[in-house]
Amino acid sequence: MNLLVTLDENYLGPLFTMLYSLHINDPQAKVHLWLIHSAMPPEALEKTQHYCRSFGWQFTPLEAEDSLFEGAPVLRYYTKAMYYRLLAFCILPEQVDRVLYLDPDTLILNPLSPLYHLPLEGMLYAACCHTGLSQITGPVNRARLHSSEDTGYFNSGVLLMDLNTQRQNIQPNEIFDYARAHASELILPDQDILNALFAERILPVDDTLYNYDVRQYDAYRLLSSGEKTMDWVMENTAILHFCGRFKPWTPSARGRFVALYKHYAHLCRQYMRQLPNS
Amino acid sequence: MNLLVTLDENYLGPLFTMLYSLHINDPQAKVHLWLIHSAMPPEALEKTQHYCRSFGWQFTPLEAEDSLFEGAPVLRYYTKAMYYRLLAFCILPEQVDRVLYLDPDTLILNPLSPLYHLPLEGMLYAACCHTGLSQITGPVNRARLHSSEDTGYFNSGVLLMDLNTQRQNIQPNEIFDYARAHASELILPDQDILNALFAERILPVDDTLYNYDVRQYDAYRLLSSGEKTMDWVMENTAILHFCGRFKPWTPSARGRFVALYKHYAHLCRQYMRQLPNS
């Protein structure tokens, strides 16, 4: 299973916690972790290598070449790193034909293989709309991005990618041109670009299974007529996503899922302390 | 490590969840589980035996003999089973000199050995007062039970027992006599009797480490001047106790620690499904 993350050194702690939860809750997964980065210190890369190897996984870091971004506008506070997930099809080697991108503010509670092996049937991506909020934000975002009424607003935190289909159908300049033309309207640039350019070529996937927004527990439960209780989540949800500003690794984090997150963060630190030095 | 539980068939699910959390978070523990019961069905005992053996643990069920309870009054809605933990010193074999009693509505997050190996120095028990609430309920309970001002009101959900000292110092009739004389005043009979008769011979232990009342997160944090955050709990607390009426295994359970509990309940069920039949 090819997994992709694109992050800098500040997110290594959350990445290790997420990977630990994957190791515990999807023990059968044979993972090849790909990291697209710029200027990650060699010690951090070695540490990640060592950690992945301890699970029997492969790890390949890829430094994004500047030449790829020659046509790219840099938007507001965002660096070119925000393009990495959208340009993964140019950066990952040709033999990688499918990859699951995961934000590091996620926790894996059940196996990923049903998502990973989903038939994409010619679509570029599979992704989730956050259904709990979509009745409010969906129409606003669709209007803002001049997109069709028929699709929701996809969250870019969990993205299954058919890289071959992308290689055949997407030009990097298409992305840069859109970013340049709409610079002032973009709020979350990578996610907005994904939705504006590709929404109709994204296979929608159930967010309560694969991109569960932890802030929306009450909405999910209500919208499912009470079916999606906490027991249901624990039995069924594969990916919890700690969306929003208040991250579960901060000391003041609050909410229903914070204890669970922090327990995994603790198990991960404990595991890493016991690892022999490479 | 000798662990004691006293429960009926209805609590097997919570017991298995608690034991699973112990197996994961105290992997070094070599457990001998003792169960004092009356009329637990043989299939339930076999299932528990099989489960314990899968962890490499020992399991011994002991049926409490009726003769032991000849002098015992039965209080209100409580059966004689409420005496089991207080009379464990009569029921467990002589060679067992120390045992840790655990309520089944607990979750083990860190190793139990520091508690288990605590020097008891002539005391009968080690136990915790719930400090978060003790400023309110402590004085009330002390007055109600006519007990000294110097001790708090101990929770009987986690009890480390020096069985030899108990065998030398406690007569079962002492317990039955107190129960008979004070029947109308007792609210939680076993816990009230423990406090009324033995409070001064109980070694107080930090509840935030070994009997963390999940309802009291805010109080614990406040009383520790902010030190006891959720991160602190995950790093330090060994025993979470889901006190009170609303149990974490019910579908409608709410609260900060419910997701963590239900995740372990799920892992436990998953583990049991994969166990080969004995």
Image (cartoon, coloured by chain):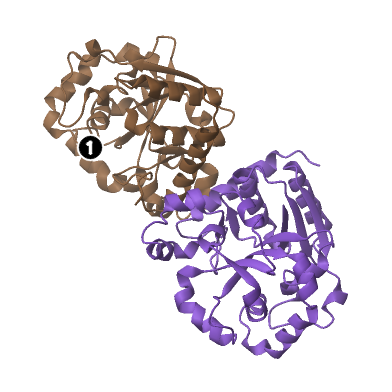
Chain colours: A purple, B brown
Near-viewer residue (B200 or A232): A232
Q: Position of residue A148 (x, y in %)?
A: 57, 83
Q: Which residue is mark 1?
A: B142
Q: Position of residue A103 (x, y in %)?
A: 64, 63
How many numbered dots are placed on residues in this image? 1
Q: Is residue B10 left or right of residue A91?
A: left
Q: Residues within 10 Å of mark 1 (few under 14, many from 20)?
A: some
Residue at 47 percent of width and 72 percent of height = A133
Q: Is residue A132 left or right of residue A66?
A: left
Q: Amino acid at mark 1?
A: Arg
Q: Position of residue A158 (x, y in %)?
A: 63, 63
Residue at 82 percent of width and 78 percent of height = A69
Residue at 51 percent of width and 35 percent of height = B273
Q: Position of residue B84 (x, y in %)?
A: 30, 22
Instruction: State whether residue B278 is above or below residue A140.
Output: above
Residue A66 is drawn in which quadrant?
bottom right
Check the residue under mark 1 and report the chain it is in.
Answer: B
Near-viewer residue (B160 or A260): A260
Near-viewer residue (A103 or B271): B271
Q: Is residue A141 left or right of residue A174?
A: left
Residue B179 is drawn in which quadrant?
top left
Instruction: State whether residue A212 is above or below residue A267.
Output: below
Q: Extreme right residue here?
A: A67
Instruction: State whether residue B72 is above or below residue A54.
Output: above
Where disc 1 sits, the SS reads helix
Q: Quadrant of the C terminus of chain A?
A: top right
Q: Is residue A26 visible?
A: yes
Q: Is residue B224 visible?
A: no
